[in-house]
Structures are given as structure tokens and as C-alpha cells.
Image (cartoon, rainbow, N blue to C red):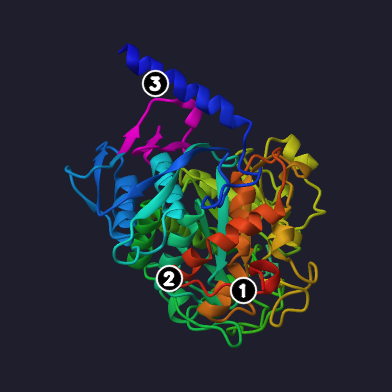
Amino acid sequence: MKFGSLLALVWIMALAGCARQSIHAPVAPGVAIIPAPQWLMVTGGELRLAGAVDVSADADAPRARRALDEVLGRVGLATSAQAATRLQLRRVDDPTLGDEGYRLRIDDGITLEARTDAGLFYAVETLRQLLPPAPPAKGHAITLPQLAITDVPAYRWRGSSLDVARSFLPVSYLKAHIDRMAFFKLNRLHLHLTDDQGWRIEIKRYPRLTEIGGASAVKGGRPGFYTQAELRELVAYAAARNVTIVPEIDLPSHIQAAISAYHQLACDDVTNLGPYAGIDVGFNILCLQKPDVVYPFVRNVLTEVAAIFPSEYLHIGGDEIKNPLYADFVARAAGIVNDLGRKAIVWEEGSVAATRPDTLLQLWNDKYPTAAATAEGHRWILSPCSHFYLDHGNYPGQPDTQTWCRNGVPLERVYRFDPRAYPPAAGVEGDLWSEFVPTDAATDNRLWPRLAAVAEVAWRDPASPLDYPGFLRRLRALRPQFDAMHIRYYAGPEVWGK
Ligand code: TNX
């Protein structure tokens, strides 16, 4: 007992010490973690892992246990009660760790602690980054630096959004993406499921939405749609990796694909009722003068969406349309989301509508006036295009990228984003629109490595000092991991070195 409390005291002192020694200081060789942990102390020495570890894990941490088994399998470590090295995974009742925080200690064994399964899962993801991506060469052991980490994210919302509407992405890509997100502790996958060029989610009550609306895409992009069964499986796959899928049905504009399937959704004088493969916006809208048509449609669609996705939030779009009935529409659509027991997310323009204060607003233009909505109690998802629109170039002038917001959003710009200059936020999200991103390879190129910087911005304490050269060192050290995940990242020398 006494010895136990002594150990606890040493542990607390170690933590107090390392609070001042953050990873932003020069990092010991061999320690490269993204996002950087809040507190890290390299204690000196190494732990050699040879052949097997003796795992003892609390039963009530299934996500973490599955991830741990995968990580050990990846490096060829067996589990055996006879192994010399102990690896403990345990839930502890420590409120300072919050819902996603964890502690990781490597001394003569490995100890992972968290209050929740999600926190333990992130401890395992940190261990994954410390380990090599593959088994060592024959006759070699794996060595880990001895260290202590205490880590808690700054923001709850650490998002990536994918536009599968302009160009479809197969389920296999989304699964790989979820794994990659988890590796960097991102936890919200926002799927932009509908737009002018395509409707990608099966809605049983309106089969033509996918029969007709799923068959189109932006010029050069991929058509397609997800069945409800596929999406349910994806939701479970994501949940096992602490990722919540947040579906977006973009309303009341960006709706040409639905209009092409059900012409009655448009006003009676509209003649443009066909599918669309261009990239203009704002030329169509649900006919808000026909509430008897529009609101049952919205309610029926959102009811099926809510049944597939358990997410606390449903995104109802609301971008890029001017209409006298717009604010009324957003208020009613958000009300439908609330009737379904969920909270709504709306793009920034929706701040003009009377919605519940728990409606999240998503900022995409730096200069959008946020004060009034903030004063009403709304919080923001920060996706200002100048830092987080990943359809803009990795470098100025990159072919097939957008430039309307600025000419290039390089990695360093993403890394240097300061959320403190913005209204109170639930978190940040990197958004990839797909007008010019028609393949898996192009998707990888736009996302990576910039999404790793999004993850760092979302996790790190915004008050801690920035160190871009240090970030690049960690990134480069993790390059074998990017390769092992088969990421076809942007490979510019200014990022990866010559
Ligand atoms: C603006 S951001 C859009 C998208 C486009 C994107 C292209 C937002 C809410 N709307 O519809 O795909 O720009 O960069």
C-alpha cells in the first residue's frame, strides 16, 4: 500500500515536471508523434521488445483492445503470459483525462491509462506511431524510448470532410480514410452526401434519388451511391475507431440532383430539371413556396438519415443561396432535426435563421460576421477556406485546384492556424471539395499531409508555442507510416526535404 502511494507520488512529480517540458522543445530522436502530445517527458533509456508481450487489459475497453491487437500484429509481436515485457491497458477514474485523454508510460513495461475506451484507443494510436510500421528484420528487436505522456485534446471536434457528391468515393476508400484519421486522432468524418452533381445516399422512400441522382457526377468525376446497409456498416467501422460520421444533406439549394429525380421539388415554372455536371452554384432551390411538397420531403429524408447515423449532429447545409424564405426554411429544417432528437449543423449563412443555440454553425469565409450568432450562444466549427479548404493547392498554382479563396493553402499555413482569433469553437475541420478531385489518388494528394496539420491544430493547446520545423521533423519521421498506409500524399520537397 505504502509502496503504491510512493509510486503514485513519483508519477505525479514526473507529470508536474514534464508539464514544463513539452514536445515543442527539441524532441529526442525516435519520438515523433502527430498531433504533439500536451505533455511528454523522455525519461532516458530504451525498452526492447522481442517476440512477445504479456498483455493485461481491462475488459471494458473493446475499441482500444482491438486496436492494440492490430498494432501488435502489425509489428509481429505475439501476446504471451510468459513474455518478459508487460503491457497494461487500464481504465482509471481520473477526471482530468476527460473523454478522450490518456496517459502512456514506457519504462520496463508499457502502461496505457485512460478514463474511457476512447482515451485508451488514443493511447494505442500513440503507441502505434512510436512503433515501426512493420516487423523488424530477422534477428532484430524493436526498441522504444522510455517516456511518459499525458495527453488531452484541446477540441472535441477534430474533423475531416469529404465531398462524395461531386465525385463519389468507394466504401473501401472511406474505410482507409477512417483508419488514417484515427492514426492522427481525428474524430469527425463529415460526409457531404448530396449536391447538384450527385445524390449518394439511398433513401428507401425516394428510390429515384439514387437511381437518377446517383448516376450523375461532376464532369470527369465518379457517379455512385451508398446503400443504407453499406452506410450502417461504415458507421460501425468508424465508431470502432472513435470516429463519428456526420452526414450532410445540403438544403435548400445545391439540390439539382434531387430535382432531376423528383421534378415536383422545383417550382412549377422551372424548366431546368435535368442532371448537372458543371460547377456553378446557387442556380436551383427546393420550391419554398410549396411547403406541402418541400417539408414532408425534408422530414422523410432526414428521418431515414437519422436512422442510419447515430451522430448527435445532422448537417443540413444551407450554403450559397439567396431567397426571401431562406431563414424560415433553415429554422424549420433545423426544427425537424431537433424533432428527431438531434442537433443541427448549418453553414455560416444559416446564422440568420432562428435556430436553437445548440445549433452549430460552420464557418467557411474568414470575414463572415459571427458576433450576433455567437452572442445568441451558437458555437462554431472552424473551416475558414484560407486555412482549411484542401481543394486549394498544396502550393500556389497546383493544377486542378481551386483558387477562389486564395492561391494555395500550403501545409505551413494550415499548421499556423490560430483558433483563438475566431469565435468560440467546438473545433476545426479540414474540408475537401471534389469538383477537381476525381480519383482516390487525387484525394490523397489534396488531403495529405495537410490533414495531419489539421489534426495538430485540433489537438494542441492553442496557447503552446508553434514550431513548424519541429512539426516537419515529426512529419518526416512518420513518412514510413504514411507509406505503410499506402497514402499517395503530396510529395513536395518543401515538405519532405530533398
Ligand atoms: C464553396 S463551402 C462551397 C462548395 C464548393 C467549394 C469549392 C461551401 C459551404 N460551399 O459548394 O465545393 O466552395 O471550394
Q: Which residue is mark 1?
A: 490
- Residue 378 is left or right of residue 170, and the answer is right
Q: Amino acid at mark 3?
A: Leu
Residue 33: x and y in percent read: 53, 51
Q: Give the tally of numbered discs.
A: 3
Residue 299: x and y in percent read: 49, 56
The residue lying at 37 percent from left, 64 percent from top is 134
Is there a contact, CB below 8 Å, between mark 2 and mark 1? no
Residue 218 visible at all: yes
> Residue 462 sits in which quadrant?
top right
Tell which residue pokes out farthest to the bottom in this image.
220
> Residue 60 sits in which quadrant?
top left
Q: Earlier in the sequence, mark 2 or mark 1?
A: 2
Of the residues tagged 3 and 2, which is closer to the observer?
A: 3
Q: Which residue is mark 2?
A: 206
The residue lying at 71 percent from left, 54 percent from top is 468
The residue lying at 36 percent from left, 58 percent from top is 237
- Residue 23 is left or right of residue 169, and the answer is right
Q: Earlier in the sequence, mark 3 or mark 2?
A: 3
Is there a contact, CB below 8 Å, between mark 3 and mark 2? no
Label 2 and label 1: CA atoms lie apart by 40 Å
Of the residues tagged 3 and 1, which is closer to the observer?
A: 3
Mark 1, other Cα within 10 Å: few <14 / some 14–19 / many ≥20: some
Q: Where, quadrant-wise, is the N terminus in this rendering?
A: top left
Magenta stretch: give its range. 88-117
Q: Amino acid at mark 2?
A: Tyr
Q: Which residue is mark 3?
A: 7
Of the residues tagged 2 and 1, which is closer to the observer?
A: 1
Residue 91: x and y in percent read: 34, 32
Q: Quadrant of ligand 1?
A: bottom right
> Residue 442 sits in which quadrant?
bottom right
What secondary structure is marked by label 3? helix
